[in-house]
Image (spheres, helix red, strand yellow):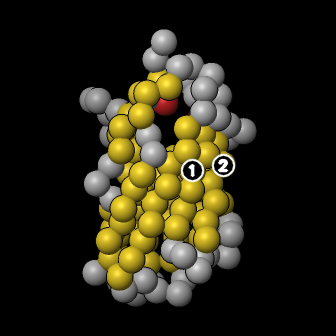
């Protein structure tokens, strides 16, 4: 089993910045992908950004140039730095860890609220 503990989030004005952190513990494979998803009210959960153990990244088009994802493999942590936030970034953000090849395992954090409003 894998446990994910998130921190960060909160209320910020448009144009502001926030930093989300997620720490993973438990049975973590050497190769995995960690990322952040978000879900706004009435919408489906969507990928925001993901990063593999090799450092390869993937971003949603809507956040490219504004958000940066990074990780520390030794500490099994992932950071999402969010700049130039917009009201449409408002959502619950979930940390995700994905691992396994033959069998794929997905683990989720409890979610943290990000609200962008003046």
SS type, badge 1: strand
Q: Is residue 4 left or right of residue 62?
A: left
Q: Where is residue 7 in the image (x, y as percent from the top left)?
A: 42, 51
Would you call the spot at circle 2 few (<14 residues within 10 Å), some (14-19), or many (20 or more)?
some
Q: Nearer the viewer, residue 104 or 11?
A: 11
Quick check: 112 above or below 108?
A: above
Q: Say which quarter of the image contains residue 113.
A: top left
Residue wearing tag 2:
68
Taking the spot 60% from the left edge, 33% from the top edge, the residue there is: 17
Residue wearing tag 1:
80
Taking the spot 46% from the left edge, 60% from the top edge, the residue there is: 22
Would you call the spot at circle 1 few (<14 residues within 10 Å), some (14-19), or many (20 or more)?
many
Marks 1 and 2, how far apart in space? 6 Å
The N terminus, quarter of image: bottom left
Q: Position of residue 90 (x, y in %)?
A: 43, 29
Q: Where is residue 43 in the image (x, y as percent from the top left)?
A: 32, 33
Q: Tag on residue 49?
A: none
Quick check: 22 above or below 59?
A: below
CB-based contact (under 8 Å), mark 1 and mark 2: yes
């Amino acid at each position: 089993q894998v446990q994910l503990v998130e921190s960060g989030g909160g209320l910020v004005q448009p144009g502001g910045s926030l930093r989300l952190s997620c720490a993973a513990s438990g049975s973590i494979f050497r190769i995995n992908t960690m990322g952040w998803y978000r879900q706004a009210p009435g919408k489906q959960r969507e990928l925001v950004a993901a990063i593999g153990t090799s450092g390869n990244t993937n971003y949603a088009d809507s956040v490219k140039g504004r958000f940066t994802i990074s990780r520390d493999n030794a500490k099994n942590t992932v950071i999402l730095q969010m700049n130039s936030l917009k009201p449409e970034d408002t959502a619950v953000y979930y940390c995700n860890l994905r691992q396994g090849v033959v069998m794929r395992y997905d683990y989720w954090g409890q979610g943290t609220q990000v609200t962008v409003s003046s």
